[in-house]
Amino acid sequence: MLKGISPLLSPELLAAMYRMGHGDVLVLADAHFPGHSLGVPVIRADGLNITQVLEAILPLYPVDTYVEAPLVMMAPVQGDRLDPAVEAAYRNVLDRYEPQAPPITRVERFDFYEQARVAFVVVMTGETRQYGNIMIRKGVVPAYRQR
């Protein structure tokens, strides 16, 4: 355990976030997501929902401000309906830690999978709400100032 770092963050996830560079993508995936078949590293966060993981990572993880769509979620398949509470919960957390982040962009299901194939890492959560997946492009950490 470390002071100031959520105990929900595993050592593997902390290490992955630290190794990520500007523009790399982190996928927070729901329990239905085919993360292990994409060919990118997968970190398990079973038992946690995506909102909890967002709460844990966003104090440490900057969202990219140099691209138009640093936050991407899956659009519903024709005939499905979105639960607006899912995106609202994510936006609530984002607004606390990254208030300058643009609106979340929605892309078609298979476009989302293709974009996830080049992600740095997929975090498989226990999220069970449909269309809960979100990709977050990493931004630049502000310059460190010694005390």
Image (cartoon, grey):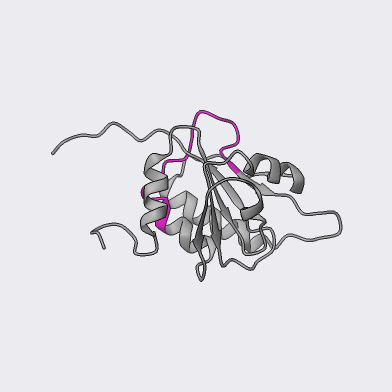
- Count of numbered circles on the image: 0
82 shown above or below 24: below
Q: Residue at x 50, y 36 (%)?
A: 24
Q: Residue at x 53, y 66 (%)?
A: 49
Left/right placement of residue 1 relative to residue 76 reads left
144 shown above or below 58: above
Residue 87: x and y in percent read: 61, 56
Whether residue 56 is visible, yes or no, is yes
Residue 107: x and y in percent read: 72, 43
Main SS of the magenta segment?
loop
In the image, is residue 70 part of the stretch drawn in magenta? yes
Residue 18: x and y in percent read: 37, 43
In the image, is residue 140 part of the stretch drawn in magenta? no
Left/right placement of residue 76 relative to residue 51 reads right
Residue 106: x and y in percent read: 69, 45
Q: Residue at x 77, y 54 (%)?
A: 76
- Farthest right residue in view: 79
**Magenta extent:** 56-71
Whether residue 108 is visible, yes or no, is no
101 or 62, which is in the foreground?
62
